[in-house]
Image (cartoon, coloured by chain):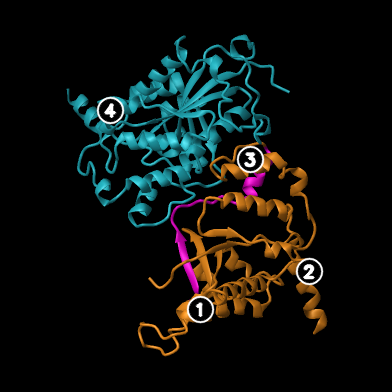
Amino acid sequence: MEDPDKKTEVVLLACGSFNPITNMHLRLFELAKDYLHETGKYKVIKGIISPVGDAYKKKGLISANHRVTMAKLATKSSDWVEVDDWESSQSEWLETLKVLRYHHQKLLSPDATNSLQNTVPLTKPGRKRKQEPNRHDPVKKKNQDPDIKSAPQVKLLCGSDMLESFWIPNLWKLEDITEILKSYGLVCISRAGNSIQKLIYESDILWKHKNNIHLVEEWITNDISSTKIRRALRRGQSIRYLVPDVVQAYIEKNNLYSPESEDRNAGVVLAPLQKNTSDSKN
Amino acid sequence: GRYQVTEGIISPVNDDYGKKGLVSARHRIAMAKLALETSDWIRVDPWESEQKKWTETVKVLRHHYNESLRSLQSTKEFTKNKQPIERSTEDSLSYQQPVLPELKLLCGADFLQTFKTPDLWKEEHIKEIVERFGLVCISRAGSDPAKYINESDLLTKFQHNIFLVKEWVQNEISATQIRYALRRGLSVKYLLPDSVIAYIAHHNIYTEASERKNEGDLLQPLKLHKTVNPLND
């Protein structure tokens, strides 16, 4: 039976290049959802994939149009994870914190189509919800449900690489990291649980907010990095079963990844590094 | 540049194998078929699972090899290729070779290690597998199949017929872990094809009870080889 304590509604937001999206990215959502549900304190109502804009200037980053399209194809079969192209359609690169704020505000505003009442999906044909192997609770009408706390939270979903990237000089602003941890929280999926715990221990700021950093151990190793996918494609090797079939077909049809595409932005400074170093000079 | 892979065959083991947690072949075949719906070159073959008893791997190899010969014979290509063709004349017999397909056993690095497990394999079978057919062994960064080969005289002798493929994209999705996740109601989406997940849910295949099946029993090959071995010398 359901736990009578109040549960916090959570939206998981994943930012990144998704260049291309892989099964590993999609797994992050499933692992995070299971983990949060097992605590008994949370109910994950939505997952959002927010591909970064082209202005990020990462080497090998192909056009946002393609990356968003592939992510949408990949999430077609999901009834709770969707793609949002707000970030990618901005003309300038945006800090992750701003994307979190945007989605949090969107969630809270009354006219949002993704409001609490509308999270009963059942729009996809053939979906036997009660036959699902996971034991997520059936969705109730939220506005009448006394078990749900009123304000949903947005949490940043990531792998351990993002957490580790906090230490790269000028990549993140310290005040941004602080606010992300304080006001939103991280759900970090990793295999190297112990070394991540050590990172948290060794950082005052992470330690201070460690209760808002949820570490999820990924027992089934799934190291399908986009870099390796692009490499395999350049070498004419198969990426079947590493990305959803529809994504593989789209990549093949549009011939997206090549030595030329990998050279895009070569020598260009990454947008956050550019921004933070020029800001600090002022 | 020497090979063209024309077919992949998945041959699920017979229920009689007696492995712990092994669910009925009917389901395992059905799931494999669903998973391969989108593949244009890999297929499932139920022959092994339909036999009355567990069948040694070498016999499965022999069966599929004979089948591929039979299908070749029945096509015109076989007669056509009996005529001398425009190929390099290095070896007078070689013009026949491109006609005959080779059948290789595809496996992971762990498989090579099992050759050492006492009573699991017959020595003459291992020899026939590596000499007559050949192995394609996929391994991850970190495992060292070359070492296992080196440690075995037999494997070393036929190492030219053992192809080692390194898998750089680590993807350690073991069926054991999948069953574990399923028993606990955890998501396996994106680890298995959606159609297989739906099938498992619909038939409620993997449970605490299913995992206990064959518990305490010896694997069939161990049972068979134990009766054949030292007692009869």
In the image, are marks 4 and 1 on the same chain?
Answer: no
Q: Residue at x 80, y 85 (%)?
A: B233
Q: Residues within 10 Å of mark 3 (few under 14, many from 20)?
A: some
Confirm whether the magenta stretch covers residue A262: no
- Chain shown in cyan: A
> Residue flagged by tag 4: what amino acid is it?
Trp
- What's the residue type where badge 3 is placed? Ala
Name the residue that disc number 3 marks.
B198
**Callout 1: SS:** helix
Residue B82 screen position, x and y as percent: 47, 84
Residue A69 position by quadrant: top left
Gap in angstroms between the C-alphas marked 4 and 1:
63 Å
Residue behind mark 2: B223
The answer to which of A224 and B97 lies nearer the viewer is: B97
Q: Nearer the viewer, mark 4 or mark 1?
A: 1
For the record, the magenta segment spans: B161-184
Chain where mark 4 sits: A
Q: Specify the subunit that label 1 lies on.
A: B
* Residue A198 location (% of width, % of height): 47, 38
Rendered orange, the chain in question is B
Q: Which numbered disc, 1 or 3, marks the residue that appears first in the sequence?
A: 1
Q: Give the alpha-carbon distance from disc 3 to disc 2, as whole Å.
A: 36 Å
Q: How many marks?
A: 4
